[in-house]
Amino acid sequence: MKNFKSISRGFFIHASLIIVSLLSIFPFLWLMSTAMKGPDENIFQYPPVFFPQHPTWANFKGVWNQIPFILYFINSMVVAGFTVVLNLILSALAAYPLARMDFKGKKTVFYATLATIMIPFQAIMLPVYLIILKLHMVDSVNNFMGFLGLILPFAVNAFGIFLMRQAFLAIPKEMEEAAFVDGCNVFQIWWKILLPMVKPTLAVLAIFTFIGSWGEFLWPSIVLTKKALYTLPVGVNDLQGMFSANWRYIAAGSIIATIPILIFFIAMQKYFISGENDGAVKG
Amino acid sequence: MYKYYKKYVPYLFLLPAAVILILFFFVPFFETIVLSFFDYNSNIYQPAFVSIDNYITLLKSPVFYKVMLNTFIYLIGAVPFLVVFPLIIAIMINQKIKGITLYKILIYLPVIVSIVVAAIAFKWLYAQQGILNYVMGLFHINPIGWLTDPNVALYSVILVTVWKGIGYYMMIYLSALMGVPKDLYEACEVDGANPVTKHLTVTLPHLMPTIGLVTMISSISAMKVFVEIYVMTKGGPLDASKTIVYYIYERAFENLDLGIASAASVILLIVVLVLSILNFTMFEHKQYQL
């Protein structure tokens, strides 16, 4: 009797989880199905057909030839790449004194940093834009300045600083003292002794910063005026305007744009689903 | 502890981050407040100080009422689902069953994929002759204008936010579930409690702080929702799906009405500030202590 109970319970759990999993990926599967239907197949057919009768890559080729995905991909890589590097360096630099040193105004710095967590970017984006304009960091000046304007406002944030601070706090103080006795200066201690010891935290910060930067849409759509600097999300949104009613192309383009992050996710899956990264939680 | 660094060294380490945070957080923060007291509507090159006129204009504007109501509906529409569904799913995944990793990957997938792509995918599901209306037809329900009916559009957009957030909050719950003492469950089983009672008496009390945390984080995110609306409805039809960030965006970057946009931003700032302070004092106090 007990056995029957546990089997039926297992069945119930699996059935529920399969349904939830399918609901999670169905919108993408349906997009894929639409993208693989040729012009002779009615995509508004009732009842809807999930498996294309004559699957084709033609829509992918068609949209690929009209949209510079490689360019958008490179732009996204540049923006996300530099955003990650700056976040790692700036967070680790700022976190060190907050974790380890005594200095005048430490409390003020600490709480001021904490306060920035409570300021939503959406509420201050207008003045940020005005500042970027004043600094000439827009793509109408040149591409380099355009990239600066995309990257710098997100070069560091309080989450990263606090995450790194927690990591430094976990390192025994004797490490630094020993290094100092061995003749390291304070910068060398930070670079050669401490940073290698917080590599796992740096990896977590890098991955979550990358995902955030890669998916960012609001800010690039505000500052960008030239298609030459479009990142992938901005390019994908643009598909709607370009192929207003051609859902085969819109679907194919959306799928193409999703492939890089999908590969990244599969490769880095342990960081996302291990459940040990609650320190990297963002609001 | 003896000092192995000179007095100015801590500031040197702080400097680069400080420059960014001051330039792109603190200055804009105060500028938002200052701008909200100026009128840019008459002449954008010569803003005039109007004290609290912008706030009065907002409070008198029916559109702003609509926007605040929509934002509130978004909050109470999305948050309960984002608190409860991921918890139930996390408890199911936390059992010793096969295929956990695959389930986790599939359920987490919407979190990873760009919100723009997700919104486009849902727009396609929501099409007038789309698959969702076909499913409705199976239940003899007339086709619904998911994104074109003013009574429905907001809820259609909320659904996308909920769908995209479930995996994220599930992972937060899962890491909290790891901390629930196993022997409590065993004691429960010895007492012959059924699974539902077990989770109600053991899991739930242990997860209360996490449930609170998820409530706060998802509330703050709901206040900040933008992309779903931008991609799917542009706030329409008839402002039916316009929430506060979209309103700010529209005022600031389409109407160049900087004063009104800033006044609305200050209101958003205050709401998020209150939610954040609640969050810090109640749930996250440990991580952010000096």
Image (spheres, rainbow, N blue to C red):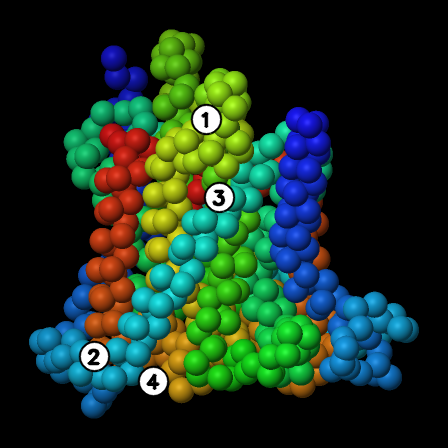
Of the pair B16 and B79, the residue shown nearer to us:
B79
Q: Which residue does the numbered mark 4 point to in the structure image?
A: B255
Disc 4 and disc 2: Cα gap in Å? 15 Å
Q: Earlier in the sequence, mark 4 or mark 2?
A: 2
- Residue B286 falls in image quadrant: top left
Q: Earlier in the sequence, mark 4 or mark 3?
A: 3
Q: Earlier in the sequence, mark 1 or mark 3?
A: 3
Query: Is A105 displayed left or right of A71 in the figure?
Result: left
Q: Which residue does the numbered mark 3 point to in the structure image?
A: B87
- Name the kind of residue labelled 4 in the image: Asn
* Contact (Cβ within 8 Å) of mark 4 with mark 2: no
Residue extending furthest front? A1
Is disc 2 in the same subunit as disc 3?
yes
The label on residue B58 is 2
Q: What's the chain of the residue with tag 1?
A: B
Is disc 1 in the same subunit as disc 3?
yes
The image shows residue A18 at horizontal and vertical percentages of 68, 49
Q: Which residue does the numbered mark 1 point to in the structure image?
A: B180
| Quarter that holds the C terminus of chain B | top left
Is disc 4 in the same subunit as disc 3?
yes
* Contact (Cβ within 8 Å) of mark 4 with mark 1: no
Residue at the (36%, 61%) spot, across then down:
B76
